[in-house]
Amino acid sequence: MDVPRLSRWLESKVAPDPLIAVQALANSHPSEDQGELLLDVETTRYWLLRFGFAADGIEVSEDDRGRLLELRGCVRALIDANATGERDAAASERLAAIVADHPVPLAVERDGRIGLDLAPAPSVDALIAQLIGVVLRAQIDGTWERLKICAADTCRWAFYDASKNRGGHWCSMEVCGNREKNRSYRRRRAATA
């Protein structure tokens, strides 16, 4: 995984490595500022190679792309619940099925510690297993709850909330936060006029 390149693409409120990989997958969806980054087999392969998720010779089929999109949908629903507190039971069930089909790859470090094997994935299924492992690790180490979806309906970008109280709502206070606060102010003014 090319963490410096991912950090430049995500720009701000970047999750720590390796959680940045899950944040990147979540942000591959279409938004106000970008189209679908996993639009077809070729763009999916390009995206995987560009950010170092996959080994050079990776083959990507339409089924692979579909499984990656399914994982992205589940992950986005779970991230959204970090801010709203509303768990998506259907997403959790779909994720359980994905997890059952993708055992997490482990590696033994030189010092004997067991960790995730995050080498560039030789296949989409291997990448899915790695990403599941990253989510598990983040849930264990407490960084998962800091990954959130921007509250701005026109944005919905995944961001890492590094604030002390974990109370962040927007990917960018300067853009989304300011826009939402101005809208709220105009609504209040209109209600009193």
Image (cartoon, rainbow, N blue to C red):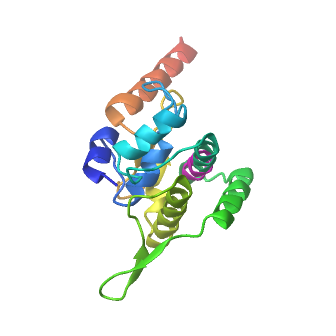
The quadrant in which the N terminus is found is bottom left
The front one of 103 and 88 is 103
Q: Residue at x 34, y 46 (%)?
A: 13
Considering depth in this image, is 128 or 157 the residue closer to the camera? 128
Percent from the top left, x then y, of residue 6?
32, 46
Q: For this view, does 16 lie left or right of residue 96?
A: left
Quadrant of the rendered structure where residue 73 is?
top right
In the visual, does 185 lie left or right of 62?
A: left
**Does the magenta portion include 1?**
no
Q: Magenta segment range?
A: 72-79
**In the figure, 108 relative to 87: above or below?**
below
Q: Position of residue 103 (x, y in %)?
A: 59, 69
> Which residue is located at x 30 percent, y 85 percent?
110
In the image, residue 174 above or below residue 17: above
Q: Nearer the viewer, residue 9 or 188?
A: 9
Q: Residue at x 55, y 32 (%)?
A: 40
